[in-house]
Amino acid sequence: MSQSYFLGCNSADGFVSLFNELYDAYDGWTIYIIKGGPGTGKSTLMKNLCKYADSKNIKYEKIYCSSDPNSLDGVIFSELKISIADGTPPHVLEPKFPGAVENLVTLNNFWNRDMLKKNRKDIIKYSTLISAEHAKCIRYLKAADIIQSEINREVLLNTDTDKLKRFILREIRRNADETSINKTPKIKNRIINALTPDGMVFFKESVYSQCDDITVFKDDYSVLSQIIIEELSSFYKSEHKDIIKCKSFLNPNKLTDHIILPEKRKAFLTDNYNFNFSTEKNLIHVSRFYKKTILNENATLNSALNAKKKAIETASEHLKKAKELHDKLESYYIEAMDFDALNDYTSKTVKEILK
């Protein structure tokens, strides 16, 4: 079964791209970078590639677009050391070693330039409006992150840190592997949940298909769970275990919400108002580490949490507006495309990539 993730998302730091995770130029990888406008068939080409891979029983990871979760941004074939990706903004990819590592797949040859020039004003207008909506989204996510900083401060003031440390140490001892193999662990960074025009999207099946043993930390405030998961991640790295670090959608440069350990078929997840895993058997409420049971009744803290939720909801609304504008922009490119010629090219390209 294929796995699904994001490798880019709008965050408090702006649009964050993890597209450097697509390939390793120094480890024999090849990447195909697609160039083309909106609606020119980039995602369709990648979906056709996945269908062809399925017919050949080739495993892969699907990388979705957080601005349109029905559209692909990339596909990774780790066993073949091949990947393909949309190399246009906001996740621009340019060849460093053209031909030797990176190959350009250009879809611009199949559009009618005269038709696009005729609609130049509308194309510029919609492109500008889309950028403005994304900027508004990011400002609200920044506000949510500022509020989260206040939540962090309040929660940590009310946390029994000694009790938390003892728990983490017990977890580390309980999960120690006496048969640990001395190898260099593979650490992958992924985004498994992101804010989209459809709200929060979480690829739960990417967890369930890889893991039988799932531990969930119930943490409405998203503070202590991240501390625990980061400590466990460091421990498993020292144990030479491969780790998929699922980064925080709000602050992917700094924080990790979940980790997946494919070799052990094990995962540690955060459960909060954004993503719910409360049905899992191994559910640990982080409230056990609070100094006071009244923390959940703290009016200031709960008011801050509600303000953060509202900021994130408003950010998603701006993403939805951006998607509506993007659909209008795409219509100009779709009208100008020669899809018969494009389909012939796509068919040949798919077979070339997975020959």
Image (cartoon, helix red, strand yellow):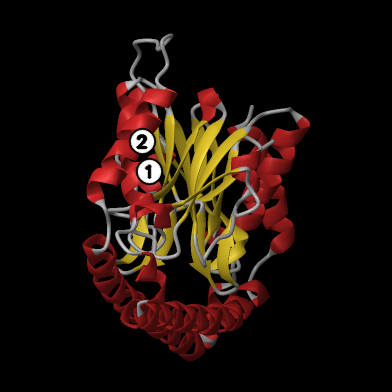
Q: Which residue is mark 1?
A: 229
Identified at 68% across, 42% down, the residue is 50
Q: Please say if the residues under marks 2 and 1 sit with CB atoms less than 8 Å apart.
A: yes
Look at label 2 and name its amino acid: Leu
Identified at 53% across, 87% down, the residue is 119
In the image shown, does 311 or 353 lie closer to the viewer? 311
Residue density around tag 2, few if under 14, some if 14–19, many if 20 or more, within 10 Å: some
Look at label 1 and name its amino acid: Ile
Q: Could you tell me residue 160's position as x and y percent?
A: 26, 53
Identified at 39% across, 10% down, the residue is 181
In the rendered image of this protein, does residue 188 appear above or below residue 45?
above
Q: Could you tell me residue 151's position as x and y percent?
A: 30, 70
Whether residue 58 appears in this view of the structure is yes
Q: Secondary structure at mark 1?
A: helix
Q: Which residue is mark 2?
A: 232
Identified at 55% across, 80% down, the residue is 320
